[in-house]
Amino acid sequence: MKQAARVAKPHVKRVTWSQWLDIAIVLVTITLYSVAWPTLHVTHDVPAPAQPVVAALAAGPFLLIRWNPALGWAISALSALIIPVAFASQPGNDIPWQVVHFLVILPLLFVVSMRAPIPIVGVAWLSTVLLFAANLGPDQVVGWFVALTAYVVIGLLIRWLVLSRRQLAKQEEVSELERTRRTILEEKARIARDLHDVVAHHMSLVVVQAQSAPYRVPDVSPAARAEFESIGATAREALNEIRGMLGVLRSDGQAAEHAPQPGTGQIEELLETARRAGVPLRWTVHGEHEQLSDATGLAVFRILQESLSNASRHAPGAPVEVDVEYGMSLVSMNVSNGPSSVVATPHSRNGGSGIEGMRDRALSVGGLLTAQPRNDGGFEVTAQLPVTTSTVPGLASWTA
């Protein structure tokens, strides 16, 4: 029995504060109606069949105090205008309405002053003052005028206090977001400085050493001179990309999407650079790349760049074949390398810059990427990417 109770307990919904308030409003309305109907004959001469309706006009508008207080006030005020005219007061009764009517119209006016637009608040205040002045004795007009005015002013003051607190909370939230943004920018600037001091500095030294080596080292052969030139060109290209990344890191983030990024237009240059670096590379490119979106173009470039880097690092000396085909809706790419003639570490599946990084880039544009060893001991990377991110929406759900 206890186990069944424990199982059923999570399915019981907790009543919220808002729901408790709704329940309280309904209960108060029922209570007011249960008082207004039996006592209506004491204050007014109302036929018995009409008493439930008149009592409902007096108490019923209280139901709208939360959902639409202006409509509730309008119904209560209109019924307060009609009841004294339609039904005569009992002898000895000096007030035009039941006490329940007072207990309903005054809270409605107060909530209207707190929530309704200012023009509606003005209309409600003036109409209520005129209503009381027309139906109450002349000796009570001034008192009710002062009381109703103070009533509305207090409601407006509470309203403005709540609004000011909300605006202050919103401003504090904006300030907190701005502080967070500044912290992020400062961290990005620090990372940019560290990258510049470490990576960019050493890459610059590589460029200088590669360019000056033929003049510093005696008896450099033409092949070695060409190798030094290739190293220098590759290092300069890497240095340019690092500088571009540093520029994005140093920016305030407002125009990061406008930072220059490589794309399919630089693929031929990437392949030529890899060949100059000594990679035995062959490639074929079919189709036109102009229709590709910037995001897809960047993904194609980075995946190809990482694939070539992995092939040269993990299978040095192995022949590499690249096949890129730009179709109407898909870009297909295959990068494969044969087995290496020297012992090398296998392709890593760890780290954001390896296979997982390529897979994430493909998925980010709604594509598919597979990377797996070949039967001959080589390795193969295959990717299919949509020409635009909205062309093939189903690709977003593919898994590698």
Image (spheres, rainbow, N blue to C red):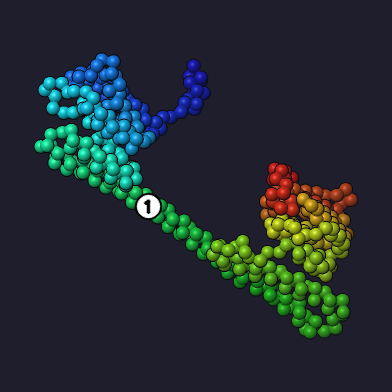
x 79%, y 52%: residue: 328
- The residue wearing badge 1 is 167
Which SS class for mark 1? helix
Q: Can residue 389 be seen in this view?
A: yes
**Amino acid type assigned to the residue bearing label 1 in the image:** Gln
**Relative to residue 396, is residue 77 drawn left or right?**
left
Q: Position of residue 255 (x, y in %)?
A: 58, 63
The picture quadrant where one finds residue 218 is bottom right
* Residue 103 visible in the picture: no
Residue 268 pos. (x, y %): 80, 65
- The count of marks equals 1
Relative image position of residue 224 (x, y in whole percent): 84, 76
User: Left or right: 78 with respect to 11?
Assistant: left
Q: Which residue is drawn at 61% across and 68% down?
A: 247
**The C terminus: image quadrant:** top right
Camera-side residue of 355 and 215: 355
Residue under the point 69% across and 59% down: 294
Residue 329 x/y as whole percent: 77, 50
Category of crowding for the residue at label 1, using alpha-carbon neighbours closer than 10 angstroms: few (below 14), some (14–19), many (at least 20): few
Q: Is residue 180 left or right of residue 117?
A: right
Residue positioned 87% across, 51% down in the render? 377
Residue farthest along the front direction in this orientation: 85
- In the displayed structure, 105 sits above or below 193; it is above
Furthest-top residue in this view: 48
| 341 vs 14, nearest the viewer | 14
